[in-house]
Image (spheres, coloured by chain):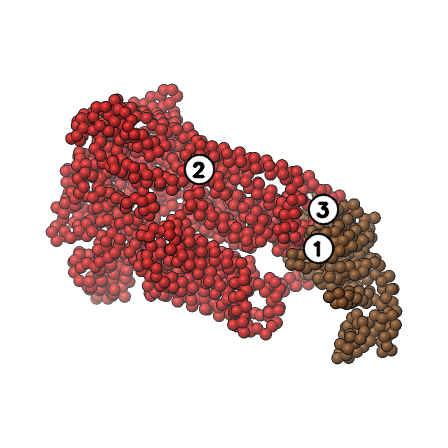
Chain colours: A brown, B red
Amino acid sequence: MLELRIEGLSKTYSNGVKALQDVSLTIPTGMFGLLGPNGAGKSTLMRTIATLQEADSGSIALGDIDVLREKDKVRRLLGYLPQEFGVYPRITAEAMLNHFAVLKGIVNAKERRDTVNALLQRTNLSDARKQNLSTFSGGMRQRFGIAQALLGNPKLIIVDEPTAGLDPEERVRFHNLLAEIGENVVVILSTHIVEDVSDLCSQMAIIAGGRVLMSGDPQAAVRELNGKVWRRVIGKHELEDFQRRYTVISTRLVGGRTVIHTVSDAQPDPTFEPINASLEDVYFHYSKRDSQAQAEAA
Amino acid sequence: MSWEILKFELRYHLRQPLFYILFLIFFFMTFGAVTSDAVQIGGALGNVNRNAPFVIMQLLLVMSTFGVLTTTAYVASAINRDFEYNTDSLFFSSPVKKSQYLFGRFTAAFIVSSLVYLGVVTAIMVGSFMPWLDKERLGPFALKPYVFSYFALILPNLFLFAAIFFAVAALTRSLMATYTSVAAFYVAYIVSRVTLRDLDSEKIGILLDPFGFSPFARTTRYWTVFEKNNNLLPLDGVFLGNRLLWIGVALVLLGLTFAFFKMEVGSGSRKKKKKAAAKEDVLVPAGVAIPRVAQHFGGMASVRQYFTTIRVETGAILKSLPFIVIMLLAVLNTVGGAVFAGPIFGTRFYPVTYEMLEVIEGNFFFFAVIIAAFYAGEIVWRERMLKLNEVTDTMPSPTWAIWAGKLTALCITLYFTLFAAVLTTIAVQAAKHYHHFELGLYFRGAFLILGMKLLLVTILMFIGQIITNNRYVGFLIALFYIVAQVVLDALHYQHHLYQVFVLPDTTYSDMNGYGHFARPFEWFSLYWTFFAAILLIIGHLFWVRGTETAMRIRTRVARGRLGIPAVTMLALFVIAFVSTGCYIFYNTNVLNHYTTDDQRDKRSAETEKLYKKYDRIPQPRITDVQANVDIYPNKRWVDIHGTYTLVNKTPQPISDLHVVMLPDVPFSVQIAGARLAKSDADHGYFIYHLAQPLAPGATIPMAFTVTIHHRGFENVSRDNTIVANGTFINNFATFPHLGYSPNVELQETPKRRKYGLAPVVRAAKIDDPKAQLDNGITRDADWINLDTTVSTSPDQIALAPGYLQKEWSANGRRYFRYKTTSPILGFFAYLSARYEVKRSTWKGIPIEIYYDPKHAYNVDRMIYGVQKSLDYFTANFSPYQHKQVRILEFPRYAQFAQSFPNTIPFSESIGFVADLRNKEDIDYVYYVTAHEVAHQWWAHQVIGADVQGGSMLAETLAQYSALMVMEKEYGRDKMRRFLKYELDRYLAGRGGELVAEMPVMLVENQGYIHYRKGSLVMYELRDEIGEDKVNVALRQLIHDHAFEQPPYATTRALIADFRAVTPPEKQSLITDLFETITLYDNKATAATVSKRADGKFVVTVTVESKKFRADDRGKETPTPVNDWVDIGVLGASKTKGNEPVLALEKHHLTTPKATFQMVVATKPDRAGIDPLNKLVDRNPDDNTRKVE
């Protein structure tokens, strides 16, 4: 079984931004969710694994491959879908995918044709195969991106915010596809959408500010928090007061009214009602704890 | 709010590096042009002050053409910035009003574009204070010309460009469309200039010139040095109209932009995409298994990846809009060039292949370089611009396959453009019914030679993009490279070993092919190809793969890529580069002397300083020349063994013989009993001291050998006379001579000042008795007998003046012996080539044309020209002194025809490829032939003294003779068009005068005077006193001076002969035409017509006539009008210059203004004064006006 081990990875950009600070993670075969807010360092981490970026220190090993040095070997096993990507104008989906297939080393023409056909079909682009990529909608483009990432039976698949821009139905299809492929290979899914992780991933990590806040089994994390999450509906003007008094992990509007979640071992007061913890609460809980720690440290 | 936006925008633009880069480029380009002669913007300055108002205006005007691009960069950024950075929604949802947004940004872009041009202004100001400049060429500082040029020329232009491209940018919101429209604008401009040129009314063409070039060019066309130094363009008339028109157009465009611009997010094309997306299938597809595939890496797989990259990238360029647009423009420009190729007197060349190749180089290549520069940026940046780089960079293809694929794709595209260019010119050839398609030559000229140049430039641009890793800096590197080339040349760093990627020129000749130009081209190509390979390996090391762009990290990555294969290849290419460099150096600097222009100038100056003191010292004269000349065409060798017979024609004994020879030519001299008293090979000056002084009247033989052996190749081929096929040498350059020769002297005043030489004396004063003892051709001979044997390779015919005595073969070579039977001037030539010969006769005298079989088009025309010339000249001047006329073709490395006794070498490019199929065109082959045959009289019978006016006796009289021969054949109407060209060239020539304009009779070998003005004044003289009288005078001149011994004739004799045949009331004409510089400003101020009862038309015309005398700097003083001038009426005609003359009367004008009435039978079109432009008038077009 292939395993990706990241140890002590750090990266500081020339403008002083510390994108990764001593990140250590072990990512086993299967779906791995990387959860974090925008600017958390997810993309830096993924790009570093995908050979696009250099690290200042630390190491990454994919099986016995040193990812930071043996980039060519990594690329042979890699399927990568970046967060944002464009396409050549004036070229059809099929021709572009065919081109990518050659770049991926699929030089046998028949094999290439079969795999291109299969991927177009699985990403539901068969009918649009002769269509110019520039006319694709955001969703179609995203599906095309998935198709190219799956070329050549990759052993390590990295997908950065893949469901952004997909409608709910497409998202489901994409999840199914990933789940099917993810059984035997390492799939790293970076997202800020909690459901993506709870739906798909057997392992996860939350990162923020370039640091790993937690990593492990999402179900276990939820179980750990169960019985500690409380909910209350409050008036808009009360929010500040509540935030001062309780550990408010999330605030949201439900039907125009403000609903807050807090984490506490015991019921803070009777006006709070207990609720089942969700992965979202886990995420907010760790984020909150981290930002408090940062504030205290400062 | 508008003000806030403006301030914000200005601050934004001024913080960008682009502003400073543009400013500096403009500054240094201009600075270079102002402070050196090597950088030229808009033509050489000649004798005009470096900071003359004319120069300031011209520089700013020329530089403003770049404004189309710089201004567009700013206006396009003003609009597209938001869309590019997706900040459009931010801006459009904020409470900024459309007018504030648009005009704030427009104004800022316009202001910044204008500020860039302060770089040009300051460069001229600062440049004119540089200490190394010649103070004589600087006028006093004045602010007014700068202010005027900036506000009247630059700002309206920039405002217009800004408005046009702001409109395009705002309405299309596409950078691509905007830049495409820039290219379209340039081409539309060029095309419109070509189309409007022939328009009946030039005024419209001038008004419609958005750059303001035409009004400037038209007003200043014939400005003299004085005017250029002192005058500003008057802001009135058509010029003012032009400025107002285009400011108006700009305002209208701004209004339209405002009306149609929508403050909306996104663009129309995005909506279209949504539509296309609507037919997506939402069904979940069946779960087809993704097949397992075998992946291959390295080896053949990498090659496949290289090829797929080529295919995709080539497709991406070929299908992109700018490419298609630039190609269309390029093809259009090529068609224009090919259709109008090579006009002389308005007559074009046959579309021969080498001419077409030159059109491709001149009219197409520039576009190909633009494509290379633009798409080098595109192709290196494509993935990153499309945000696709993260996908492709993680694919397992090797780095080299990606960049090499891209570079190959770019090169394929460029070859495709060359192919398109070739097809275009072939189509033009076919359309012109020219069916001799030389595909092999096309292949060589377009694909091998131009292709190599393009390839190297492309690699440079490509590498520039990789290394700088910034598109715009990459483009600037390209620009800098082009500027650097010019600057290096200017600073006399001219060796192609360090002029990066600059290959030596190659000139193709039908006769000699690429000849001796091929080898240096090939070696330098190889040399720079190795250098390109080195650069590409470096490019490979620094190719950005991934998202790291910091140089620190790229260097680390590069070190990682520097494995054994890279090091090995690098080492191999460095070795190859250095060894080819050594071989080239051995050829250019060891086998040959490498000298730069300024080193040669310096040597000329030294020679003059050292030996001018010997100018015209008494020397014996050559009376007989016996020479064996052996030409080895393939080796490019010439061996000369000769003997002069020298006679002391002076009254004193001569003890020192001053022998001069071109420097660097190995030669030896044997004079019995002489001792070499001074030997200066560097300056080619040798003094032999005779043991026994040569007594007056005594004779002494002087034997000599000269060996000219070309070995290897030079950096720039300077000798194009000894070649494989088409050798043409004369004794000036290859034989030793006696006495100091002023031919070495530098002519240009600034250069002379630089080397501390006194102002040039171009000719001795007309009455200098010492100089009158020399003729204008050779100082060391009067009339000689020539007996010469010339040998060549067996496939060639060798020729020299004189008559063939004997022809034989020996030692595998072909020998010809030529001997003159009557004395000739001491100037003769040798030619050798694989000739075809066409023979004819005139009254028993053989006429022979030796030509290259590839172009026999005009051979019959030449024969006919010789016959008609002999007819006229023998009937009107004197008998022909020789028994034969030969015209001999030589390669187009030089473009002239030259008359030797019974022998006329004629350049391939002058007569042999002229396309005379259109009978309307001026038959200049006939004209040149007549001119050269006329020299058998004017030079070879009557030769002037070596003083002022000497070239009038030869050239002006040959012009007159040719005009008469031509007029007999083609009629007076055709002559009008010919003389129009002559007037134009004369007026333009005097504007470029370097020293001083002279009256015709004192001409100091100035072409624009002795040819161009010569034609005009002789024709006018003929018109006024009649052809018979002129010929009487010329016969008198021959009678008095033909074949005379020293002292030789001067123009005083000719003028006296003219005066003798001119009636007393017209004597002032001689003064006006020959003795002074006289100009007219004639114009028609009113012209009306009324129809009479009998159907005839009465034309009333009011005319003004002004007359000026100009000094040698062009300063004019009015002089009273007292002339017989044509007043005439013209009918309508489709082509300019062909209007039928309905009435033409000579009137004696004595007042500046006069009114005349004429009656004509057919409908008049125009009427006025001097309607046929016989007088020298700086504005000939206003002489007539449309009748009302």
Tag count in the figure? 3
Element at label 2: loop
Relative to B661, B114 lies left or right = right
- Quadrant housing the C terminus of chain B: bottom left
The residue at 37%/52% (across/down) is: B131
Instruction: Name the residue tied to disc 3.
Output: A69
Identified by mark 1, the residue type is Lys
The residue at 45%/45% (across/down) is: B488
Q: Residues within 10 Å of mark 2 (few under 14, many from 20)?
A: many
Element at label 1: strand
Contact, mark 2 vs mark 1 (Cβ under 8 Å): no
Q: Which subunit holds the residue at mark 1?
A: A
Mark 1 to mark 3 CA distance (whole Å) = 16 Å
- Quadrant housing the N terminus of chain B: bottom right
Instruction: Name the residue tied to disc 2.
Output: B715
Q: Residues within 10 Å of mark 1 (few under 14, many from 20)?
A: many
Instruction: Name the residue tied to disc 1.
Output: A11
Give the image quarter of residue B573.
Answer: top right
Query: Which label sits in the foreground, 2 or 3?
Result: 3
The residue at 38%/35% (across/down) is: B719
Query: Which label sits in the foreground, 1 or 3?
Result: 1
Q: Residues within 10 Å of mark 3 (few under 14, many from 20)?
A: some
Is residue B490 in view? yes
Identified by mark 3, the residue type is Arg
Relative to B132, A247 lies left or right = right
Where's residue B201, x and y in %? 34, 60
Identified by mark 2, the residue type is Asn
Element at label 3: loop
